[in-house]
Image (spheres, rainbow, N blue to C red):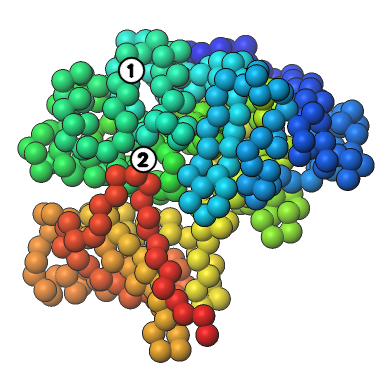
Amino acid sequence: MEYWKEEIETLSRPALEQLQVRRLQETLARASHSPFYKRMFAKKGIDAGSVRSLDDLKTLPFTTKDDLRNNYPYGFAAIPLKDCVRLHSSSGTTGNPTVVLHSRRDIDEWAEQVARCMYMVGLRDTDVFQNTSGYGMFTGGLGFQYGAERLGALTVPAAAGNTKRQIKFIKDFGTTCLHIIPSYAMRLAEVMHEEGIDSHETRLRVLCIGAEPHSEEQRRRIEQMLGVKAYNCFGMSEMNGPGVAFECTEQNGLHIWEDYVVAEIVDPHTLEPVVDGEVGELVLTTINREAMPLLRYRTRDLTRFLPGSCPCGRTHRRLSRFQGRSDDMIILKGVNLFPVQIETILMQFPELGGNYFITLETVGASDEMLVEVELSELFTDDYSVLQALARDVSRRLRDELLLTPRLKLVARGSLPVQEGKAVRVKDLRKII
């Protein structure tokens, strides 16, 4: 077994937790210099030196995205701005964006973190890495770029969109690894097929996929269509960006790097810790960041800790596949559900394509769900066969969701194609 830095990746649990406590104490002392946390500590009577164990972390209040927006742009800066070398931010289309500051050391550690992830899935300095993420204020571009360069790979900063150009680069440059959004990976495979290109004959062998919830079935379909191994990755700009957690070659949970963050999982409604192994909202505290430490940040992402050790030998805990976000939950007729549950069912039918759309609407006095899904290009147009397929899919959806959505099978290419994060749900319900 090979590791990027074995001494860190295979630390014993006691040693890892001891490291976390030391870094947590340093983080609290640093955070007390930021305007936001300085006010919070004073208001709540918090002494940064009183946290002496990981259990003591639970005595601190949560930090939310609204806190970041309300303290825009520099209210969380824990060091002078002259010592910061970069900021990233969200789009801010619904108000102030969230801003994250980085020192030179933060950028260096981030590159190290991403390189560790890439090395874990078998990438080396002999690989050609192509990044289909947007650059600029979005962290997925520069985050993976710096990590791949730290790894020593030849990097292709292709950026987002222009699918035919992406394919040309894959062929011409001998790309061996892509960083790509799952829905766009399926679109890429479809365009390759349309262009008569056999992806199995390229040098492509690894995909790093993330940035949107996706099912295991979608991952397996991507692997089959492109002839690759696809590894799930998790990142968010508030925690630097990509590299927070990553699958190893076992493809059985994402190792969350506990020398960079302390992870908790809480009930999103009560905010109390859940039983170990139970699904809840992931809460993260940075412990290796200078410019802008965050304490108990509510990610809104739903996951759970996986029990047991990983055969890869790494001791950092594993998170299960993300089930969606607590703020993406659909409540329909008293039933709580997530789009990824619908995707999981749809991807089990080879007769169906990868593009689908969910519309919530009010019909009469009742709220209803319409699921539109494209058919596979190779599937029949025989009406009786389509009817039988629709009945089968509808039954499976009803069994999973405990309600019956209306299902509409549409021709391939009928639904909008998005080359960024896929928008899967439109809520048109009337408030009566």
Q: Quadrant of residue 196?
A: top left
What is the tally of numbered marks visible in this picture?
2
- Camera-side residue of 13 and 362: 362
Q: How crowded is mark 2: few (under 14 residues within 10 Å), some or many (20 or more)?
A: many
Res 24 visible: no
Q: Where is residue 294 in the image (x, y as percent from the top left)?
A: 69, 35
Q: Quadrant of residue 211?
A: top left
Does residue 51 appear to the left or right of 95 in the view shown? Answer: right
Q: Which label is found at residue 155?
A: 1
Q: Is residue 327 above or below residue 304?
A: below
Residue found at x 63% / y 38%: 73
Estimate the spatial distance between the alpha carbons at disc 1 and disc 2, rounded to whole Å.
Answer: 18 Å
Residue found at x 45% / y 13%: 150
Q: Where is residue 355 in the image (x, y as percent from the top left)?
A: 27, 55
Q: Mark 2 points at which residue?
A: 181
Does residue 383 appear to the left or right of 361 in the view shown? Answer: left
